[in-house]
Image (cartoon, grey):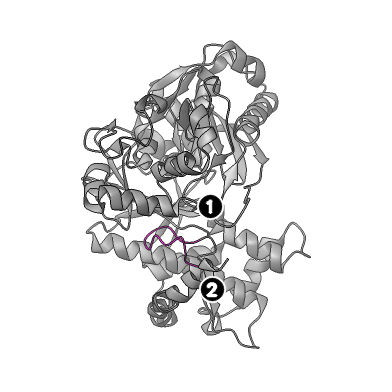
Amino acid sequence: MSYTLGVDIGTFETKGVLVDGAGVIVAQATRAHKMLVPQPGWAEHRAEEDWWGDFVHVTKALLHLSQVKPEDIIAVACSAIGPCMLPVDAAGKPLMNGVLYGVDTRAAAQITELTENIGAELIMARCGNALTSQSVGPKILWLKQQRPEIYAQTAMVLSATPYLTWKLTGDYVIDHYTAANFSPLYDVNRLAWTQELAADLIPLDRLPRLAWSTEIAGHVTAAAAAETGLAVGTPVTIGTIDAAAEAVSVGVKDAGEMMMMYGSTIFIIQLTALPVRDARMWYAPWLYPGQHASMAGLATSGTLTHWFRDQFARELSEGAFGILTAEAAASPKGAKGLLCLPYFSGERTPIHDPGAVGTFFGLNLTHSRGDLFRAVLEGIASGTAHVMEVCRELGAEPLRVLAVGGGTKNAVWMQATSDFGGVPQIVAEKTIGASYGDAFLAAVAVRAVLPEEISEWNPVARVVQPVAEPIYARQYPLWKRLYQQSRDIAHELGGGQ
């Protein structure tokens, strides 16, 4: 037998799977870690402990649980949260914590500065994306301006997955899908790094080599083998961001297919026949040459449900989410007229507003905890519907929506998302997520399977059908107006912190 190993570093947890040649999972392992929030608007991980330390832990656990011989693992693939900004020195040692993806909004001033200096239209034409909190370029400028001593020592700027592949192989590489988030340093038309838009931002030799996700980055070194238990010389793929691997895991492979990822954030990826470029969304070349991806992401979704549990259900046992969901299910749709703006860490697509704030509106003395939790779930579902609305405006109506992630276990959340968005959601048999997609991509990389064979590895299990709800038809426009009419107050409040 031969096996492939997939490991994914998430916002709060690392997951690993060992899979045989037919896609059967022979072992799973997880390890929790924390997202550090040193101050409002910041979000960080410790690269050595949370990324590499977790990879080592779950890999050893998988080998122990499965009793698979390391030499029978034919390829390894990693994915991780991203895009991140991690400066490392000449020896590859992290110089600070990794700055996370769009939930970290520290570079708001640098986004404005770069956009004004370069021009929004030129950035969109060359990079395919507006500069937002998801962009790595402004965070590099923040590093240069606010931490000049670290910038001076920086030999390479990595995201999370490239850091893992470097630890495994000793090579600095990055996939095109991740690199497209390094605006204004990546030219989507030439599929290459560029200094033409921001010559003084950072030398290009401090950015990793570009490649496609299923190319081989290198092979497990003796040092990495000693730490992980893997065999020396095992092929390691370039890898990608977790959301992309998650999309692969549930069968997203053709134009018109969309992934709806229910994780720490809602993240959406739709494959398109041609590039879809709009400032409200994100664009990137897909994992394989010739394919394109249109993307969106909310800032807080699963993170918000965790916050709610910790603040309002602290006394409950490990079954807290089940109890909260049951209470939400008992609340009528519309949560008795309660609206929630889920902008508890600003918001990413489609409004791109780091100054947006979380809001409960319409509270009265009849509302219960269950009503509040339903409002949270419906607020996230409304944010997702807002993205779907933009997709339709851009002529990118999804043909199939495939749902994945821990939130797929929450029936109230899933149904509200279908109802607000007006779309059926397909749930595959295996909803493990990115680590399973990594294992499949590893098999593709060594030609053990073809990309289209994911449907055989992970068939459809069920479909959530939308229901036309008059209460939602009434509340959704009010939900959008609530943001518009409270935006200035939110910004003034934030400015006084």
Estimate the x, y position of residue 43 in percent, counting from the top left: 57, 49
| Mark 1, secondary structure of its residue | loop
Per the picture, the main secondary structure of the magenta-coloured stretch is loop
Which residue type carries mark 1? Gly
Residue 274 drawn above or below residue 334? above
For the N terminus, the image quarter is top right
Which residue type carries mark 2? Thr
| Farthest residue, direction bottom | 365
Residue 425 drawn above or below residue 22? below
- Marks counted in the figure total 2
- Residue 349 drawn in magenta: yes
Residue at left offset 39%, top offset 42%: 137
Q: Nearer the viewer, mark 2 or mark 1?
A: 2
Magenta stretch: give its range. Answer: 346-358
Looking at the rendered structure, which numbered label has been put on residue 317? none
Mark 2 crowdedness (10 Å alpha carbons): few <14, some 14-19, many ≥20: some
For the C terminus, the image quarter is bottom right
Estimate the x, y position of residue 305 in percent, counting from the top left: 60, 62
Within the image, what quadrant is residue 477 found in? bottom left
Mark 2 to mark 1 CA distance (whole Å): 21 Å
Asked if residue 177 can be seen in this view, the reply is yes
| Mark 2, secondary structure of its residue | strand
Estimate the x, y position of residue 6 in percent, counting from the top left: 53, 31
Looking at the rendered structure, which numbered label has been put on residue 359? 2
| Residue carrying label 1 | 263
